[in-house]
Amino acid sequence: MNPSDSAAKAPSRLVIASRESRLAMWQAEHVRDRLKLLYPQCEISILGITTLGDQLLEQTLSKLGGKSLFVKELETAMAEGRADLAVHSLKDMPMTLPDGFVIAAMLERDDARDALISNHYASLAELPAGAVVGTGSLRRQALIAARYPQLLIKPLRGNLDTRLAKLDRGEYAAIILAAAGLNRLGLAARIRSFLPPEMSLPAPGQGTLAIEIAQRDDGPDLIALLAPLHHAPSALVSIAERTVSRQLGGSCQVPLSAYATISGDQMHLRAMVATPDGRRMLTAEARGPASAPEALGLQVADQLRAQGAADILAT
Ligand SMILES: NCc1[nH]cc(CCC(=O)O)c1CC(=O)O
């Protein structure tokens, strides 16, 4: 599609709602810049919004009631007509959106892996017994505890710059962060090693950006407008991963991984649920047609349930 074809559908202005962290702003600016190239006549601005989740960021997310804390104010802005779309890390979005909101596009996935950041050690295996590893994620906590029980895991909260500053002050021997966020902020040089998916199976949607809109009958056809940004393979794997989490009632309160890849017309989906201490860990995987991601997600969720996932999720 060339710019003049798409320009016909574009409104004269669009407002993108975004959280105000540096990562969120980078993501909103990225979408703005891509839309500007497609629709040069359209005036696109970013509305920064501090969410309740951001205000409470120093507290443990798993105790706060989860992901909707980071999206609600952006949805209110869209419902009130103050914004047309919102850009999110898909990983931070609830598995079920409130009535009236939909994901209009998912962008091509960045690196989905977790990464180790440290000023002294190049990998988890190098860390001495008793070394303190920082992570805010129950998933990462459980995976590290299961594989490296000699390490001490301490909570780590705050936005990316805050987390790196805490590492640099010496509060941790190493911290674990998503490679994608570091790549986006130009901080890839801080990555000492990548945790392979076999060891640290990623969170549903990790590394993928999603654009959310309010469904309405009037106004421009935003789904058509955003279609050039949509990356179908990334959307298919995300749907499979999010289906597992939705089926198991996944939230930030439980350590849960789901990670899918596509090769040819086949999808491979792996998933994990664990207790936060990593002592009980269930894994499941399945392969199937990439065109039926929900079926694959249901199948893997059923396998986990058959192994007793409900007990783990209830603890
Ligand atoms: N929970 C915060 C969050 N949400 C999205 C990312 C990284 C970017 C992504 O996964 O798309 C991060 C930081 C992290 O987990 O290190």
Image: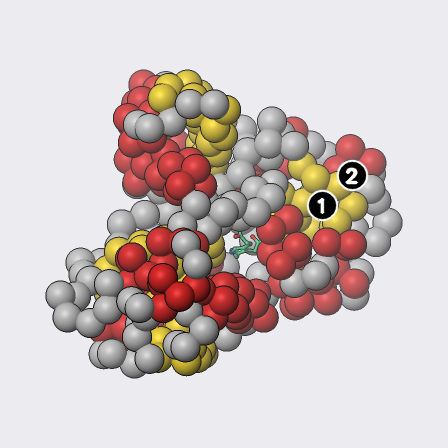
- Amino acid found under the numbered disc labelled 1: Leu
Horizontal side of residue 308 vs 120, given as left or right: left
Residue 123 left/right relative to 41: right
Q: Where ligand 1 lies, by image quadrant? A: bottom right
Q: Position of residue 156 (x, y in %)?
A: 61, 57
Q: Quadrant of residue 44?
A: bottom left
- Kind of element beneath mark 2: loop
Q: Please identify the quarter of the rendering in which residue 226 is found.
A: bottom left
Residue 297 vertical position relative to residue 218 in the rendered view, above or below: above
Left or right of residue 1: residue 142: right
CA neighbours of label 2 inside 10 A, class few (<14), some (14 to 19), many (20+): some
Which amino acid, mark 2?
Ser
Observer-nearest of 122 and 237: 237
Disc 2 marks which residue? 123
- Whether pointer 2 and pointer 1 mark residues with C-beta atoms closer than 8 Å, the reply is yes
Q: Which comes sooner in the sequence, label 2 or label 1?
A: 1
* Category of crowding for the residue at label 1, using alpha-carbon neighbours closer than 10 angstroms: few (below 14), some (14–19), many (at least 20): many
Residues 21 and 16: in front is 16
**Residue occupying the point 69% across, 32% down:** 148
| Residue at the image point whose x is 72% and y is 34% from the top | 150
SS at circle 1: strand
Left or right: 50, with 77 as reference point: right
Q: Is residue 54 visible?
A: no
Determine if residue 180 is in view. yes
Above-or-below relation of 39 to 170: below
Q: Which mark is residue 116?
A: 1
Farthest residue in the right direction? Answer: 120
| Colour mapping used in the image | secondary structure
| Spot occupied by residue 48 in the image (x, y as percentages of width and height) | 45, 78
Measured in 3D between alpha carbons, the distance from the residue under mark 2 to the one under mark 1, in whole angstroms, is 7 Å
Residue 218 in picture, x, y percent from top left:
15, 70
Residue at 35%, 39% in the rendered image: 239
